[in-house]
Image (cartoon, helix red, strand yellow):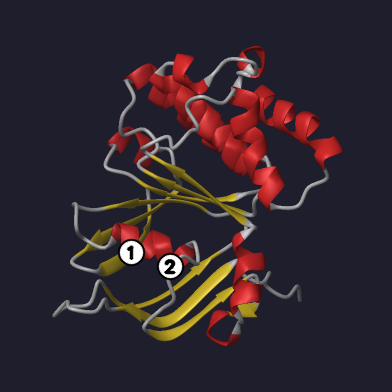
């Protein structure tokens, strides 16, 4: 009998409480995210979606419970080990956070510097990421010359240039019109098809419908479920 594959992320009885708050930002949660997961998280503002995303992205540590990422017990991991694990994760936000005066190519290259990729490999890797999002022809353009849809596609190229194991998206279509939103979601689907797990927080029903698995969050409680 084949042994089940090790999950990318596993939580057991994880909670998160912030100082000065009477209630938990995230109630007791047990979950598993596989390496091929594609999940949409929905829920009202202030429900705990961002808290969940920060915990999944190793930005925060659980207050109680235990969590694992790629087999590493996070409760026992050193700060150096957590830094190495974070290099396997990429974020895409509603806000673009581009360096406006820099070129598209320079923006996409930036994570390669932080990851210690040899400089000789930067241009080829960044251009491949720009090809993926359909913007290779704008590599020399400055970020402040781009439309909103183009900016979000650049942020996607910047996120995937290091080939992350996990892509976390926080309202990636929130500031886009329908056509640009569909283009961004198509790219996210492609990234997932190339082997990255995807977890997306969204208020957009169209975006949520693209994910085969959907979780709901309300008052810090995650409801796990699979879409029909």
**Badge 1: how crowded within 10 Å, few (<14), some, or many (20+)?**
many
Residue at the location (17% across, 77% down)? 21
Question: Which type of secondary structure does the marked residue at label 2 adopt?
Answer: helix
Can residue 162 be seen in the rendering of this structure? Answer: no
For the residues bearing labels 1 and 2, Cβ distance under 8 angstroms:
yes
Q: Which mark is residue 51?
A: 1
Where does the image place residue 122, in percent across and percent down from the top left? 77, 36
Image-quadrant location for residue 140:
top right
Q: Is residue 135 above or below residue 29?
A: above
Q: Residue furthest right?
A: 120
Secondary structure category for the residue under label 1: helix
**Left-right relation of 4 to 16:** right
Q: Name above or below for residue 214 compared with residue 156.
A: below
Q: Residues within 10 Å of mark 2 (few under 14, many from 20)?
A: some
Residue 76, by quadrant, is: bottom right
Judge left or right: residue 17 versus residue 163. left
- Give the answer, above or below, for where 187 lies relative to 14: above
Task: State which quadrant residue 97 falls in.
Answer: top left
Q: Is residue 163 left or right of residue 73?
A: right
The Cα atoms of the two marked residues, 1 and 2, are separated by 6 Å
Residue ranking furthest to the front: 101
Give the left or right position of residue 45, taking residue 166 as reference.
left
Image spot of residue 223 (x, y percent): 30, 65
Please identify the quadrant where the N terminus is shown.
bottom right
Judging depth in this view, the residue of 52 and 79 nearest the camera is 79
Residue at 61 percent across and 67 percent down: it is: 83
Q: Position of residue 209 (x, y in %)?
A: 37, 39
> Which residue is denoted by mark 2 in the rendering?
55
């Amino acid at each position: 009998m084949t042994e089940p594959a090790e999950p990318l992320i596993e939580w057991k009885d994880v909670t998160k409480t912030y100082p000065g708050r009477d209630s938990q930002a995230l109630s007791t949660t047990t979950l598993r995210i596989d390496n091929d997961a594609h999940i949409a998280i929905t829920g009202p503002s202030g429900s705990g979606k961002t808290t969940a995303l920060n915990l999944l992205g190793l930005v925060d540590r659980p207050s109680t419970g235990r969590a694992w990422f790629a087999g590493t017990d996070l409760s026992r991991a050193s700060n150096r080990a957590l830094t190495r694990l974070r290099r396997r994760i990429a974020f895409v936000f509603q806000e673009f956070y581009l360096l406006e005066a820099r070129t598209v190519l320079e923006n996409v290259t930036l994570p390669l510097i932080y990851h210690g990729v040899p400089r000789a490999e930067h241009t080829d890797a960044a251009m491949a990421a720009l090809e993926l999002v359909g913007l290779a022809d704008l590599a020399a353009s400055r970020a402040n010359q781009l439309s909103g849809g183009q900016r979000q596609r650049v942020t996607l190229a910047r996120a995937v240039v290091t080939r992350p194991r996990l892509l976390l998206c926080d309202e990636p279509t929130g500031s886009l019109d329908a056509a640009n939103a569909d283009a961004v979601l198509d790219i996210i689907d492609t990234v997932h098809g190339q082997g990255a797990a995807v977890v997306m927080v969204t208020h957009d029903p169209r975006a949520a419908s693209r994910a085969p698995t959907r979780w709901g969050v309300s008052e810090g409680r995650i409801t796990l479920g699979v879409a029909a």
